[in-house]
Structure formats: C-alpha cells, structure tokens
Image: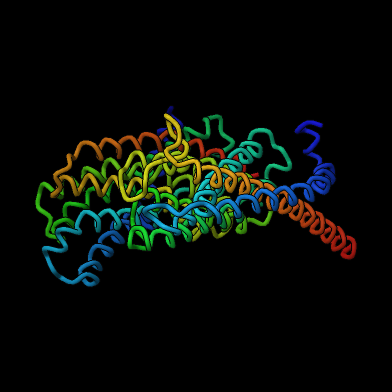
Amino acid sequence: MTALAALVRRDVSVAMRVGGGALIGVLFFLTVVVLMPFAVGPDLALLRKLGPAILWIGALLASLLTLDRLFTADHDDGSLDLIVMSRTPLELACAAKALAHWLAAGLPLVAATPVLGLLLNLDATATGAVALTLLAGTPALTFTGMIGAALAVVLRRGGLLLSVLVLPLSIPVLIFGVAASNAALSGPSPFGTPFSILCALSLASLVIGPFAAAASLRHGLD
Amino acid sequence: MTLIDLANPSRFLALAGRILPWLVAVTVFVLAIGLYQSATAPDDYQQGATVKIMFIHVPNAWLSMFVWGVMSIAALGTLVWRHPLADVAAKTAVPIGAAFTFLALLTGSLWGRPMWGTYWQWDARLTSVLVLFLMYLGLMALWRAVEDPSRAARAAAVLTLVGSINIPIIKFSVNWWNTLHQPASVLRMGGSTLDRAFLIPLLVMAIGFTLLFLTLHIAAMRNEILRRRVRTLQMLQASKSAA
C-alpha cells in the first residue's frame, strides 16, 4: 500500500514540476476553446449551443496530448522496468499511475471548465453540468487511454499510433458526456440517464484499463 | 489430429494444401447458388429491386463482426496458450475483416441512398460499424509498427480483446437506440420476420461468404507462414555471409 501511495505521490509531483507537462494540457484546452470562435464565428448564441461539445472535444484532445507521458518518461529512465519487476502487482501499479496522471492532468481540466464556460457564454447551471460530466468522464478517458499508452511505450515512436488506437475507444465516453451536458443545458430528456451511463463507463474502464495495460507492458518489455 | 498437432506450421501447411482446393470449390459452388437465388428472388413490394443489395450487404455486415470474433479467439490463443499459429491467424484476419467492414459500409450507403434518401446518417448502427472499421485500421497500423512479429502479436492481442467490447454494442445497437436502421429481423426471439423467399437466399449467401472468409484466411495464413520462412532464411543467409 505504501509503495502505491509513494508511486502516486512521486508521479503527481513529477508532473506538477517544470517539464512535467501536466499543466500544458490545460493550456492546450484553453487554446482549443479559444480557436473555436474563430472557426464557427463569434455568434454567442451558437457558441452557447455548441459549448458542451466544444468543452468535451477540448478536454478529450488535451487528455490525449498528455497520455503520452504516462509511461514514456519512466520507460526512458528505466524506472518502468523496476515497477514491472517489483513485488507490487503490476495491475495495481498501473492503476496507481493512472490515478496520479488523472490527478495531475485530468482534474486541472475539470477545474478550468468554469472559466472556459464563461468564454463560451454558458450560464452557471450549464457550466456546472459540463464540469460534473467531465469530472465523471475524464477518469474513463485516462483509464482507457492508459491501454494505448502502454501499447505505445513498448513500440518505439508510438505517439501518433496512440491517438489512432485510443480515440475509437473514447467515443462512447464522448457521446454520453455530451448527451448529459446537453440534457442539463436545454433538452427535455433527463440528465440522470446519460450521466449514470457515463459513470458506469468510468467504473468499467477502471476495471479493464489496468489489466489490459499491465498485460501489454508485461508482454512488451522483455 | 488435434489442435496441438496443428501448432506445427509444417503440418498446417500440408493440411492447408490438401483442404484449400476443396474449400475453393465448395465456396464457388455455394456462392453461385446464392447469387443465382438472390438474382431470381422476387422484388420487394416496397423497395423494388434494390432489396437485392441486402444479399450482399447483410453477409458483409455479419462477417465484419464474425472476423473480429475469430481474431478475439486467436488473441486468447496468443496470450493464454501461446499457440504459435494464433498470431498468424490474428494477423492475417485483420485486412480481410477490414475489407468486409468496408464493403458493408459501402453497400449500406448505396442501399441507403434510394431507401432513406441519404448516403450517410449518424445512426447508432452505422456509427458503431464505422468505429469498428477504424479499429481494424488501427490494428493494421499496430501490426506494421512493430518489427518483431511475436511482440506485435501480443500488443495486437490486447487491443483486439479490448476492442471486442464493441461487438455486442454493434449487435444490439439497433434494439437499444431506435434510430434509422431497422431492428434485427433475422436472428431474433420468436423467429425471423423475413419472408422465406428472401430468407433462404440470404442464409445461402451468408454461408457462402463465411466459406469465402475461411478460404481467404487459410490461404493468407499459408502465405504468412511462407513469408516468415523466407524472412528467416534471408536472416540466416545474411548472418552467414557476415560471418
């Protein structure tokens, strides 16, 4: 248990320091959201309608951008081999690393959502709903993305491949995240149904992700 | 002869050489019957002659899922039993499955234009099959990204098993989300809703396409084994001339 806690603490502090790259994700998120009005025009009513979708796409791309760092840094300096060889089960170590990654890269995205919602003319309820769906959905993005990150680290130069492999798996999360946010914003359909499916997707990826990532790390690093 | 005996590639090659001519003959025979039956099937009272696209479209769609199922079993063979032919089977099935999925999307869109008035609709079944196609392409990219075949096999096996979650979603998407695509009509509780005049050619075509997949797959597996042998021989030659 202490080993896992130490792993989480180490990963979070590495990610938060200079060159760790966790906050780059938030900066990227901001840039994507700022680009949108240039693409669709500064029509505030339209932006308000597209708001949840823009925020979700931005968060998805930002979390994809930082996923590359989940294992590569450890692979480069050799600590990944130590983690694989240690007595802690690799599945738990993967889950701990993904948790640390979510704390350092996913949670800041959720925290940035209210500010970015303001830029997109979203009112308080809508912003709250999008932030809530991101809070429930970003763990699913991290834990399914971890599978791709583990596959990419055993290949060389797998960064581009990572996005091709991970994006199809993240489509259900995107669908239900945007559906729940839109339901809170305008729709007659209730918020609860898509939101609980989103939570279920997160829980399922919490189970599947560490096992698949550990399997590909074990087989890939010989 | 058991499954373990087939693990020997030479035995597999010998068996494939004996089976393949017969398999090709049976496939051509069944497909010929199926095509004749579908050509002579009556026109639908609503759709007219375009209903015949179904006899190509539905088998392709079935095969797109069936091939992923075969790949998932092969992935288990790679990860659990370390069966040496499982990764050959998994690798060679990917392009065939991608082709079937592409044909299902293409014929579906050609059928959708006169029936629904649109080539493409973001409907649950169509979208999930498109995602399946993207995953096939991703797997092909993954196979090519790694040089060592046994290492690529294990990485691809993990991704195949994760991706197999998509298969039940595609199967039940038409029942869960009532969008444009019609609900299941052949395999359903309480029997098929299809008329016999359409059902029988459709089933014959489905069997014919499955046989076509088996033929192509065994031939591709044989090619892959031979390709690996050539590669090994080249490596041996190179190391000999280097020494």
**Measured along the vertical axis of the image, is residue A91 above or below residue B108?**
above
Question: Relative to the observer, which residue lies in front, A53 or B46?
Answer: B46
Q: In this view, does A2 lie above or below B94?
A: above
Residue at 15 percent of width and 45 percent of height: A184
Is B5 displayed left or right of A202 in the figure?
right
Tell me residue B5's x, y (percent): 81, 34
Left or right of A155: which side holds B12? right
Q: In which quarter of the image is residue A193?
A: top left
Locate residue B212, reporting x and y percent.
66, 51
Task: Kindly identify the residue that appears in the image at 89 percent across and 65 percent down.
Answer: B241
- Which of these two is toward me, A147 or A178? A178
Which quadrant holds residue A200? top left
> Which quadrant of the figure has residue B4?
top right
Which image quarter holds the N terminus of chain A?
top left
Colour scheme used in the picture? rainbow
What residue lies at 33% left-to-right and 62% top-to-bottom?
B117
In the image, is A57 to the left or to the right of B127?
Answer: left
A219, A76: nearer the viewer? A219
Q: In this view, does B4 lie above or below B16?
A: above
- Residue A221 in sight: no
Number of marks in the image?
A: 0
Looking at the picture, how far across and down is residue B57, in whole percent?
50, 53
* Left-right relation of B100 to B222: left
**Location of the C terminus of chain A (image quadrant):** top right
Residue A90 location in percent, x, y? 52, 34
Name the residue nearer the viewer: A62 or A161: A161
Against B81, residue B205 (above or below) is below
Is residue B43 in view? yes
Outermost residue, top side: A1
